[in-house]
Image (cartoon, coloured by chain):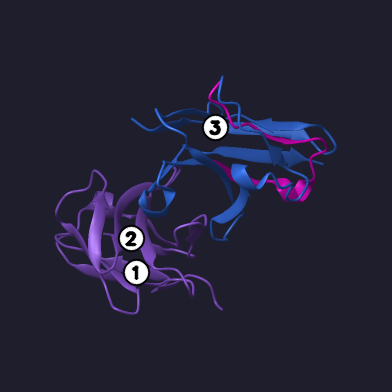
Amino acid sequence: AQRVTQPEKLLSVFKGAPVELKCNYSYSGSPELFWYVQYSRQRLQLLLRHISRESIKGFTADLNKGETSFHLKKPFAQEEDSAMYYCALWGVGSGNTPLVFGKGTRLSVIA
Amino acid sequence: DAGVTQSPTHLIKTRGQQVTLRCSPKSGHDTVSWYQQALGQGPQFIFQYYEEEERQRGNFPDRFSGHQFPNYSSELNVNALLLGDSALYLCASSHRTGGPLFGPGTRLTVL
């Protein structure tokens, strides 16, 4: 079964501190992993996709197949990073399978 | 391109009523998926439409039904509304190789 676990419901960090949002997954095949972000009163937005290997807004995430993890990291948190972050998994044959989401982590960056 | 659009933005219904939510996918996307996001939870997959057919379905009762039109737009219908159906309903569109993009959602309140 496909499952995504985000162990932290809330993460509070000070501005300028490093951030790591944890995501672990369970999937028997080769998944595609995503991070979505939802700012207050805005729609869910695609932040990162592991196959693109991009850095968006200073965030990076590396897929670790051995540890089945896809943690989201940023070296220096900014106040505008405060939002809900969702890790999501897309199965093999991605085009027509649903995303499976974790329950989300609320990041609060304190000035 | 306006991206994924949904209507209406907000909706208030009473128990037992029926509701129809609408979604227009991003231009070039042919697959539409619907998700329910309860307060404080990650989005839960309801079903997915491709080529006007329901291809996959999550763990939702038959009261939840849908349709996809030839122009790829989609409707979500919920019959015999329950208080527990109150949630944000998200539509996501995708194509074979892209990550799903989400609409702003429809906030449904059942009284």
Q: What residue type is labelled 3?
A: Lys
Looking at the rendered structure, whether the residues under marks 3 and 1 are on a common chain is answered as no
Label at residue A9: 3
- Judge depth for marks 3 and 1 and give the one in front: 3
Chain B: colour as depicted: purple
Q: What residue type is labelled 1?
A: Leu
Task: Find disc 1 in the rendering and name its residue.
Answer: B11
Find residue A16 and report its horizontal and vertical position in percent: 85, 37
Pointers 3 and 2 in contact (C-beta within 8 Å): no
Query: Bounds of the magenta span?
Result: A67-87
Label 1: element kind: strand
Subunit bearing disc 1: B
Could you say whether the residue bearing mark 3 is in a helix, strand or loop? loop
Q: Which of marks 3 and 2 is in front?
A: 3
Identify the residue position indicated by label 2 in the image: B109
Labels 3 and 2 share a subunit: no
A53 in relation to A25, above or below: below
Residue type marked 2: Thr
Q: Where is residue B105 in the image (x, y as percent from the top left)?
A: 44, 63
- Viewer-closest of A17 and A30: A30
Q: Are marks 1 and 2 in contact (CB under 8 Å)?
A: yes
